[in-house]
């Protein structure tokens, strides 16, 4: 009845040792910096760094997308990344989420999709990461 509440407020903290705040999962700052530096100088597509909203269902309306954007100020919606980062952090491993965007959010009849371009960018991105020694 009081509206949206984060996991800590609900009594389900993400992180036992305080490396996550509320519902915010922090990527490894060092790994994020290295990836941003590597990819920003080698890829033809623009790199943006910022929060990604973890959702249980992709927004299918403009109103739902705006609500998520207002609450999180996120660049994108995703479902898996926070769980992967949380698992890696619990295992004392570095982790960072990289998202290649294939579609817009919001009203389904207005969404724009470009899976072919997203897969090409993903291929280019993975090749750049794997080609580096560090």
Image (spheres, rainbow, N blue to C red):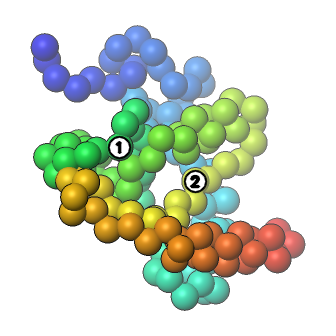
Q: Looking at the picture, how far across and down is residue 122, in whole percent?
A: 62, 70
Q: Which residue is mark 2?
A: 97
Q: Looking at the picture, how far across and down is residue 10, in whole percent?
A: 35, 14
- Calculate the distance from the C-alpha at mark 2 to the C-alpha at mark 1: 18 Å
| Dot 2: element | loop
| Dot 1: element | loop
Screen quadrant of the C terminus: bottom right
Screen quadrant of the N terminus: top left
Q: Which residue is mark 1?
A: 58
Q: Looking at the rendered structure, which numbered label has been put on residue 86?
A: none
Q: Is residue 51 left or right of residue 42?
A: left
The one nearer the camera, 16 or 95, is 95
Vertical relation: 79 (above or below) 16: below
Q: Looking at the picture, how far across and down is residue 111, in whole percent?
A: 28, 62
Asked whether residue 17 appears in the rendered view, the answer is yes
Q: Earlier in the sequence, mark 2 or mark 1?
A: 1
Q: Looking at the image, which residue is at 75% across and 32% down?
A: 91
């Amino acid at each position: 009845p009081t509206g949206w509440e984060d996991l800590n407020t609900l009594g389900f903290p993400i992180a036992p040792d305080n490396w996550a705040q509320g519902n915010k999962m922090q990527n490894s700052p060092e790994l994020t910096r290295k990836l941003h530096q590597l990819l920003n100088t080698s890829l033809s597509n623009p790199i943006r760094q910022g929060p990604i909203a973890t959702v249980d269902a992709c927004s299918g309306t403009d109103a739902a997308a705006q609500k998520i954007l207002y609450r999180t100020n996120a660049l994108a919606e995703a479902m898996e990344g926070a769980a992967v980062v949380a698992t890696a952090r619990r295992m004392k491993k570095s982790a960072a989420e990289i998202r290649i965007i294939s579609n817009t959010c919001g009203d389904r009849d207005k969404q724009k999709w470009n899976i072919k371009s997203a897969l090409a960018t993903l291929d280019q991105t993975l090749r750049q990461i794997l080609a580096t020694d560090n």
